[in-house]
Amino acid sequence: MKPRSAYKEVWNDLSGAIKRAVMHVMGDVEEEQLQAAGEETVKDLQATVGANPGDVVLEIGCGVGRVGKVIAPLCKEWIGCDVSSNMLKHAQGRLKKLRNVRLVEISGFDLKPIPDESIDMVYCTVVFMHLDEWDRYNYVLEAKRVLRPGGRVFIDNFNLCHDTGWQVFETHRTAFAPGQRPSHISKSSTPAEIETYLKRAGFQSVQIREKNEWIQGWGVK
């Protein structure tokens, strides 16, 4: 079994075909459901950090462009970053009609291709669950680096402290023996963890919201 931290290899293996890629992002859903999920996420972004017409917006872990398809028309430029070249290929196909989209392959640990202080808003949604804790924090630090002064960041994960989040935790604990858990298995966060990452990275005006089984955190550089 591949180590969890072999993100590029793991996610390329999981995303060869678009149907398989979507399955590992959202489950067995059709395009209409994928679109609706993207719209719901953009509502959360608009309610927290906002997406303005003049913004350069970057997504960490863009997958097949679930959110990018909805948010790109609302901003100046949308940059989708992903560790998987397969995911980026699928995103390119889904977003081909949008002229302000740029797709960037990253290592899985940082945003090295993105220059310092070049972005207005960074978000990372439904990604932290697949990362080790150290790598979650690395991305928060990288978001701080690439954001312009006054830029905004948004991150989320499912909540260990919520009954539904705990149920996911227990299901995964009992379904797989130690050493047999899939490399991409979802791991939760707590509100305190998300808040700590943002504050330790130096973000200001940090806020945490628990929305059903989700934790959402955001702040300003």
Image (cartoon, helix red, strand yellow):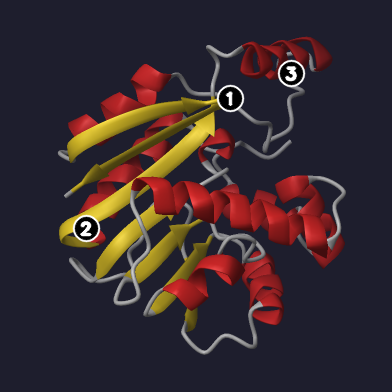
Left or right of 184 in this view: 113: left
Which kind of residue does numbered mark 3 sit on?
His
Q: Residue at x 37, y 80 (%)?
A: 76
* Callout 1 touching callout 3 (CB < 8 Å): no
Element under disc 2: strand
Q: CA distance from mark 1 to mark 3?
A: 20 Å
> Which label sits in the foreground, 1 or 3?
1
Element under disc 3: helix
Q: Quadrant of the N terminus?
A: top right
- On screen, 18 above or below 200? below
User: Counting other residues with Cα less than 10 Å from the Cα at mark 3, is it few (<14), some (14-19), or many (20 or more)?
Assistant: some
Q: Residue at x 86, y 59 (%)?
A: 30
Which kind of residue does numbered mark 1 sit on?
Asn
Q: CA distance from mark 2 to mark 3?
A: 36 Å
Label 3 sits on residue: 172
Left or right of 21 in this view: 82: left
- On screen, 177 above or below 221? above
Q: Is residue 113 visible?
A: no
Label 1 sits on residue: 212
Q: Which mark is residue 151?
A: 2
Q: Is residue 61 visible?
A: yes
> Which label sits in the foreground, 2 or 3?
2
**Looking at the picture, how far across and down is residue 177, in whole percent?**
78, 13
Which kind of residue does numbered mark 2 sit on?
Gly
User: Counting other residues with Cα less than 10 Å from the Cα at mark 1, is it few (<14), some (14-19), or many (20 or more)?
Assistant: few
